Image (cartoon, rainbow, N blue to C red):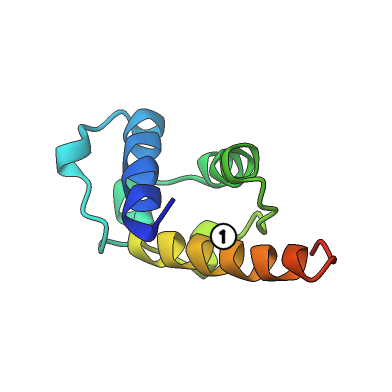
């Protein structure tokens, strides 16, 4: 799964959380501009863990404030995680 796939996954999830059409979500806009609450941010972190087997901080949406930022962070984290698994270590 690449960054574009992750970006689309994020758009669809945020659309459902926030009850807005996917076409209304700009991946470069700050998530707080859509009214993302801390509850939805925690839910997003849990969904990322469940979907990508990647543990992320509950502050992910604040540390990486746009969909583009989060998608890039997930891609980089998964690449890092895979490299460590290949070396016999799980991070």
Q: Residue at x 66, y 52 (%)?
A: 54
Q: Residue at x 40, y 50 (%)?
A: 6
**Residue 34 location (% of width, % of height):** 31, 47
Residue 54, above or below 66: above
**Local secondary structure at mark 1:** helix
Q: Residue at x 73, y 66 (%)?
A: 86
Q: Residue at x 38, y 59 (%)?
A: 3
Q: Which residue is mark 1?
A: 60
**Residue 8 location (% of width, % of height):** 31, 45
Please count the marks in the image. Answer: 1
**Residue 75 location (% of width, % of height):** 49, 63
Circle 1 Cα neighbour tier, 10 Å, few/some/many (<14 / 14–19 / ≥20): some
Residue 64, above or below 21: below
Dividing the image into 4 quarters, which one contains the C terminus? bottom right
Q: Quadrant of residue 57?
A: bottom right
> Image check: 55 left or right of 7?
right
């Amino acid at each position: 799964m690449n960054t574009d796939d992750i970006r689309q996954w994020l758009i669809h999830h945020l659309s459902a959380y926030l009850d807005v059409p996917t076409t209304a979500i700009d991946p470069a806009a700050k998530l707080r501009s859509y009214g993302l609450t801390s509850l939805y941010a925690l839910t997003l972190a849990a969904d990322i863990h469940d979907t990508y087997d990647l543990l992320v901080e509950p502050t992910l949406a604040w540390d990486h404030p746009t969909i583009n930022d989060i998608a890039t962070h997930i891609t980089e984290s998964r690449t890092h995680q895979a490299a460590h698994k290949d070396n016999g270590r799980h991070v």
